[in-house]
Image (cartoon, helix red, strand yellow):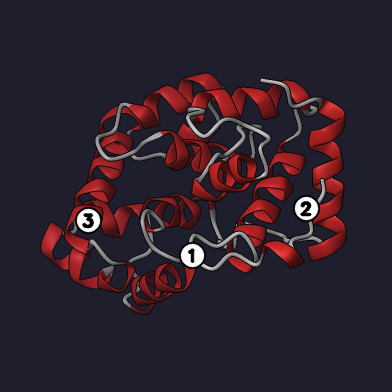
Amino acid sequence: MALSSERILAIYEKLHDCFGPQEWWPGETPFEVMVGAVLTQNTNWSNVTRAIDALKRGNVLSYQAMVSMDRDTLAELIRPAGYYNIKAGRLQNLLFMLRDRYAGDVDVFLSQSQETMRESLLAVKGIGPETADSIVLYAAGLPSFVVDTYTHRIFSRHGLVPEETTYDEIQETFTHALPRDAALYNEYHALIVNLGKEFCRKTRPRCSECPLEGC
């Protein structure tokens, strides 16, 4: 793929100048980030926030509380996130992996190598590359570049990557072009999300106002 390091960094600078620091991911603990990464699948962050708040009000936003919870109870608590029965199952799959492979010790899980952690996550039913990379980057603080729908939409619309480009291909483009820096990956992904929400919408995009116009 033809995107150069200079061009990718120039896009980052344009977005940073437009939006400023993002300070993403909005989670108080690594475990909360892990839960949020599952809940944010196929929904917007405001719905995730409502589900997280429900878990906090119930004083159950912890591994110990959630791993022993039955699926129906968990599903009801996370109902605001949408697809709550499916997501309850996926959260349980994640929790059971932590129980069976790491004795429920989240810190031990997050202290692994990036490659081992990502492999463990991708082995969990219902966790794909985007969710896995979000956990690796935002919960563990390791440099795993997150590619989401916004990333593909923005960079393909601007002719920077082909429409048929895969997740792994886009991720490889960014990781080869950028310094291996978790803070940079964090900020870049957050800026892409902001651009996608504010300008590069799925329908009625604000192309003429886009910070990347002519980039």
State the residue at coordinates (65%, 67%).
206
Instruction: Assign a secondary structure to mark 2.
Output: loop
User: In terms of image quadrants, where is residue 44?
Assistant: bottom left
Identify residue for label 2: 212
Image quarter (top left, top right, bottom left or bottom right) of the C terminus? top right
- Under tag 3, what secondary structure? helix
Q: x%, y% of residue 35?
A: 40, 54
Given the image, on which type of amino acid does mark 2 rest? Leu
Using the rendered image of the protein, determine whether residue 170 is visible from the camera's viewpoint: yes
Look at mark 3 in the image and give the residue it sits on: 88
Front position in the image: 103 or 152: 152
Mark 3 surroundings: few (<14), some (14-19) or many (≥20) residues within 10 A: many
- Outermost residue on the bottom side: it is 57
Mark 3 or mark 2: which comes first in sequence? 3
Disc 3 residue type (three-letter): Ala
The kind of residue tagged 1 is Thr
Graded by Cα atoms within 10 Å as few (under 14), some (14 to 19) or many (20 or more), the crowding at tag 1 reads few
Q: Which residue is mark 1?
A: 203
